[in-house]
Amino acid sequence: MKSQSPSLIVFLTSLISSLTFLLLFFFATHQIEKAIEYAAIFWAINFVLSYFFFRTYILTKIAQVYRLVFPQKKQLISKMMHADGIDQMHQEIEAFNEKKRQELSSLKEKEVFQKEFIGNLAHELKTPAFNIQGYILTLLEGGLEDARINEKYLQRAAKSVDRMIQILDDLDTISKFDHQQLTLEIKACFLNELLLEVIDEFKLAIEQAKANIILEIAPEIKVLADKKRIKQVFINLINNSIKYSSENVQINIKSIVVDKQIMISIKDNGPGIAPKHLNRLFERFYRVEESRSRHLGGSGLGLSIVKSIIEKHGSQITVSSTLDEGTSFSFQLNKA
Ligand code: ADP
């Protein structure tokens, strides 16, 4: 409902009181002309005084509250005696209220996320730390002299140290992205060449898993990207396809030119991911099968790093997957 202006309210209240005065005066004296004359004078004095006091009182009170909410806005206060001014103020306070409500809910979300993050981090680091402690204690309590276990336990402890370093490295990368400390070195690079370099790094893992990588990218396609970071994206995605699939997985890497962009997809025919996991997949520490992923050396941070890198390139990564059929990740990069 539209607000009434205080001037109108004052006008109406002084009119009502003047009419009352007129009626009372008329019934007391039976002189209608005098009654009208005095009532008019009464109304004029009443209106001017009430308007002045009402205005000063309301303006002072409203201005105090309004300045608390909007310390930087002063110009509207003088307009408050008009209905439009009050309506405008009402809308501004409602918008302010809505903004604060949203800020509060996002802060609450962040708080939950932060608590989960610390919990996950402690959980991730605890496992290798306890393993190292166990191996070292066994070695100190005589195992060092036992030729059957000493080397084996040292190797296991070293593996756990590697795992801790991997988690810390991933966290370091994420934190640098969060704090905008990572600036990309965007250059034109040949996509096919970049992928051949990545595949070369995976040679051993590919051979061991008998994986078949099919690269369908024209050699002349050039993208604008930070080579090192985009290589990291392909490493994480290809590594996941190999890691989570059984032997003989087929991985298709394709590109399509869409206007000024190159759409890239990495598709495997591995085990797939159930739909309920898909919208949480890029969250930090999120894993589909916790024990399996940890056993395979995963930290649950790989895809969140991939997402950060792609977003830093001004793009988005999407996933589609069908259980027992396979998984496909796609994103776009600017054409060079
Ligand atoms: P991790 O470092 O543990 O591998 P990621 O963030 O890379 O974590 O992946 C999150 C989860 O997504 C993994 O636990 C895994 O279950 C699932 N996942 C990722 N890629 C694939 C894939 N290609 N096929 C099946 N599952 C996958």
Image: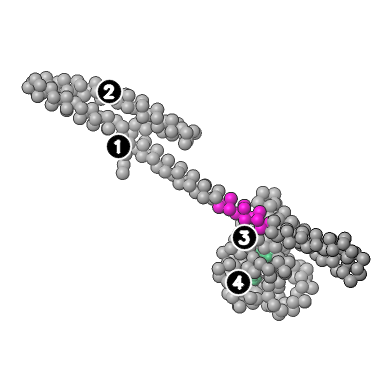
Q: Is residue 155 left or right of residue 225?
A: right
Relative to 304, is 66 above or below?
A: above
Residue 112 placed where, x, y %?
58, 53
Which one is in front, 157 or 32? 157
**Cα separation between marks 4 and 3:** 15 Å
What stretch of residues is rendered in magenta? 109-121
At a point 31% along the width and 44% down the height, the residue shown is: 1
Residue at horizontal 36 percent and vertical 39 percent from the top: 87
- Left or right, 80 with reference to 158: left
In this picture, is 97 found above or below 254? above
Task: Tell which tag, 2 or 3, sits nearer the viewer.
Answer: 3
Q: Is residue 119 above or below residue 190?
A: above
> Magenta stretch containing residue 138, yes or no?
no
Q: Which residue is mark 2?
A: 48
Q: Earlier in the sequence, mark 4 or mark 3?
A: 4
Q: Which residue is mark 3?
A: 283
Work out how far the residue at label 2 is from the one at label 1, CA to CA, in angstroms. Answer: 18 Å
Q: Is residue 74 visible?
A: yes
Q: Are marks 4 and 3 in contact (CB under 8 Å)?
A: no
In front of the other: label 4 or label 1?
Answer: 4
Residue 220 visible to an observer of this rendering: no
Q: Amino acid at mark 2?
A: Val
Quadrant of residue 56 within the rendered picture: top left
Label 4, ligand 1: CB separation under 8 Å: yes
Spatial CA distance of label 2 from label 3 is: 66 Å
- Circle 4 crowding by C-alpha within 10 Å: few under 14, some 14–19, many from 20: many
- Quarter of the figure with residue 145: bottom right
> Which is more N-terminal, label 2 or label 4?
2
Q: Position of residue 103 (x, y in %)?
A: 52, 47
Query: How busy is the neighbourhood of tag 2: few (under 14 within 10 Å), some, or many (20 plus)?
Result: some
Q: Which type of secondary structure does the marked residue at label 4 adopt?
A: loop
